[in-house]
Amino acid sequence: MEIVEKQPEVKVIDTLERLGFKTASTKLKTLSEKKRKLAIAYEFYRVVTEEKVADFQSKLRKKTANWDGRQGYHKLDFVPVESYENVPTPDVLAEMEVAQGRKCFDSYEVAYIKQVEDPLLFGRIKGCPDRFFIAQWDNDVSIDDILKPNEG
């Protein structure tokens, strides 16, 4: 019989659970799971911080203010995939399946600019402000518009 040694954190969770410390056990499990998800996400995906989104929004606003003589400007909007009404391309769906298989994201969202066809797909982790780039539809809006090639 092979003995499999548990990680110290797992042992503590098991002990807390066994002794009736349910709230402490649940809290530690949640933190442990978040740590696991973040490690996977930061390893496999480019990271887009809130600051990078704000910088892009600012550039987009300056670039498109009073565009074609119209009032207003373009803006990058984020919508949960459940609410997105257009059909992603097959390659984006395939990348999302890979991301789901890694079990590191709590939710997914599509970033798009109204009147521009090709959006971006991001993964999100509850409690983390960063967005994790998964795929893009074409090049109308590109991750390279938000991040430099060596960033993220």
Image (cartoon, rainbow, N blue to C red):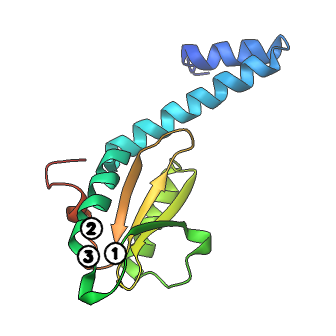
Q: Which residue is mark 1?
A: 73
Q: Residues within 10 Å of mark 2 (few under 14, many from 20)?
A: some
Q: Are circles 1 and 2 on residues that touch, CB within 8 Å?
A: yes
Q: Residues within 10 Å of mark 3 (few under 14, many from 20)?
A: some
Instruction: Check the image and report above or below for 152 versus 146.
Output: above
Q: Nearer the viewer, residue 142 or 106?
A: 142
Q: Are circles 1 and 3 on residues that touch, CB within 8 Å?
A: yes
Q: Is residue 3 visible?
A: no
**Residue at x 33%, y 42% (from the top left corner):** 43
- Residue 151: percent from the left, percent from the top? 19, 47
**Alpha carbon separation for disc pair 1 and 2:** 8 Å
**Alpha carbon separation for disc pair 1 and 3:** 5 Å
Q: Which residue is mark 2?
A: 60
Q: Which residue is mark 3?
A: 64
Q: Amino acid at mark 3?
A: Thr
Residue 116: image quadrant is bottom left
Q: Amino acid at mark 2?
A: Leu
